[in-house]
Amino acid sequence: MSYLSETRRRRTFAIISHPDAGKTTLTEKLLLFSGAIQIAGSVKARKASRHATSDWMEIEKQRGISVASSVMQMAYREHVINLLDTPGHKDFSEDTYRVLTAVDSALMVIDAANGVEAQTRRLIEVCRQRDTPIITFVNKMDREVREPLDILDEVERELGMACVPMTWPVGQGKAFRGIMNLRTQAMTVFESGSERLPQDFETIPLSDRETLTKRFGKDFEDAMESMELATGASHSWDHEAFLAGKQTPVFFGSGVNNFGVMEVLDALVDLAPSPQSRTSTTLVNRQPVVKEIQPEDKDFAGVVFKVQANMDANHRDRIAFVRMASGKYTPGMKLRVQRTAKELRPTSVVTFMSQRREAVDEAYAGDIVGFTTHGGVQLGDTITDGASLQFTGLPFFAPELFMTVILKNPLRTKQLQQGLAQLGEEGAIQVFRPEIGGPMLLGAVGQLQFEVVQHRLKAEYDADVKLEGCQYTGARWITADTPAELREFVNAYPQRMAKDAADTLAFLCTSPYDVRLAQERFPKIHFHPLREHA
Ligand code: G4P
């Protein structure tokens, strides 16, 4: 098969949802119905074991498992579907944002009783910034939930995207009768239970109105009425508008009952985009020039969107997850890390091509390749087989929480530095080195990140640290048009300057006014709340 047809048959997506909306259940059913797993319960069991204890350290112990499940690949209808997992806890939302940079579409799962909830809202914003197409699944129709029209209204408002219903529920809760498929013009009759396969549900054509009315009575009539209202008021399906992130197809169902899920799997194949071009910069005559990398380009190019370090504490290894943007991966090929111009020398490579995770021989744009290395790879790194370019767009957010790191045993300084450098590169936390010296600062977006890092410093680097509060409440990365302007600014605020893990200069703030005042004094300095790896 040509590169073009290989990439065209790929779909790479992530599920966005608020905890408990049904992401794990849906993931499991998608894997089950595509044949990627044989037994129901394996994904769920993984979650259960993570949930069994509220202690996140136990979660940490399960990291081996979470890596294995961070990319799940399915083959379905001659297509290769890569599902990227996102961490559930809001304190790790930064990781989720970065995973979202590696997908071409997102599946939004909402609980039909709760509508669009807080965490989903934040993730939607990230998708919208990138115009990522979103497929919507309204879950838990077997419960007493909100009216479908009401839910569509809310999704439209929250997403700023027009909803186009693809299926429509008949009844809900105890009176949930099924869904009408508006494309095939047939009703699939609901039965509860998790043993049934999608093809085992009874279907009745909508044209057989008599049977439908006789069997489902008022529930059916009401559903027809609300469906006609919804389709009358909504835009007609426009595939281009969906691809541009302006329309979302909406499906209803009940994940736990295997109901309405196959329609979503089919939508991923039929509607979701194949790998898209990715923006990079390259130097031409020493000037950065924007270059679009096409998925069918022959040269290998990819970006590290996730690094998971120290899977085995004795080996100091780390897995760099690379989203391929173009080319073909074959084992043993020579790859280079663009930032350092050094060869990438992995000790092992996992592609997620095979359902059994055996060593596999090829991967294409859209696929994720996991390289285990002893270092030399950071989040945001661009990996190519020769071409000199750098992908843009991997976001780091300015932290809002800061702590000072105090080492309990000063003889472990080297280990602390090594640990912080590696955890910083992994994106577990942001590490700031004050320019005037003194203890390192840790910056986080969520409180739990501190606890994880403190624990990992001890467990993986034998560096026992105390974390103390400090006066900082924010940071802005700074740039200027000329080195002289930057120097002038740095000289004016020597105590406020720090460099992060990527050696980028940041201005530390103690209040929101700091930035405003500094900006007034130095109008030519640019203050960035978000740093993109570039
Ligand atoms: P999450 O990954 O988004 O956090 O959600 P998860 O799939 O774990 O689902 C959260 C809860 O909602 C689970 O119940 C799950 O069984 C239930 N659920 C998922 N889909 C449906 C559905 O379509 N209908 C109904 N009624 N419930 C659904 P739990 O009690 O937390 O776990 P369990 O004991 O059922 O496994």
Image (spheres, grey):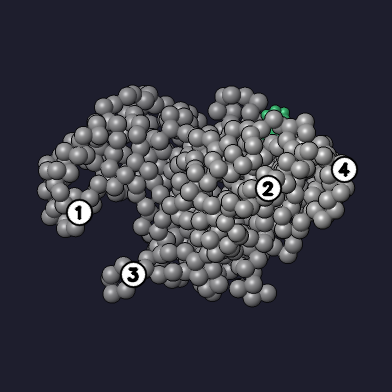
Q: What amino acid is labelled 2 in the image? A: Met
Label 4, label 3: how far apart the Cα atoms are: 66 Å
Q: CA distance from mark 3 to mark 2?
A: 50 Å
Residue 29 on image: x %, y %: 73, 45
Mark 3 or mark 2: whose residue is earlier in sequence: 2
Q: Residue at (53%, 46%) from the top-left corner?
A: 156
Residue in front for this viewpoint, 19 or 162: 162
- Kindly state the secondary structure of the residue where label 2 is placed: helix
Q: Which residue is mark 4?
A: 214
Q: According to the image, label 2 marks what residue?
A: 227
Quadrant of the rendered image holding ligand 1? top right
Mark 2 touches mark 1? (CB < 8 Å): no
Nearer the viewer's eye, disc 4 or disc 1? 4
Of callouts 2 and 1, which one flags the residue occurring earlier in the amino acid sequence? Answer: 2
Which residue sits at x=47%, y=56%? 131
Q: Which amino acid, mark 3?
A: Val
Q: Residue 274 sits in which quadrant? A: bottom right
Q: CA distance from mark 2 to mark 4?
A: 19 Å
* Discs 3, 2 touching: Cβ within 8 Å: no
Q: Residues within 10 Å of mark 2 (few under 14, many from 20)?
A: many
Which residue in the protein does label 1 denote?
480
Q: Secondary structure at mark 3?
A: strand
* Amino acid type, label 4: Lys
Amino acid under disc 1: Ala
Q: Secondary structure at mark 1?
A: loop
The N terminus sits in image quarter: bottom right
Q: Residue at x 40, y 49 (%)?
A: 395
**Dot 3 corresponds to which residue?**
289
Q: Which comes before the other along the chain, label 4 or label 1?
A: 4
Q: Are marks 4 and 1 in contact (CB under 8 Å)?
A: no
Q: From mark 4 to mark 1, how far is it between C-alphas?
A: 73 Å
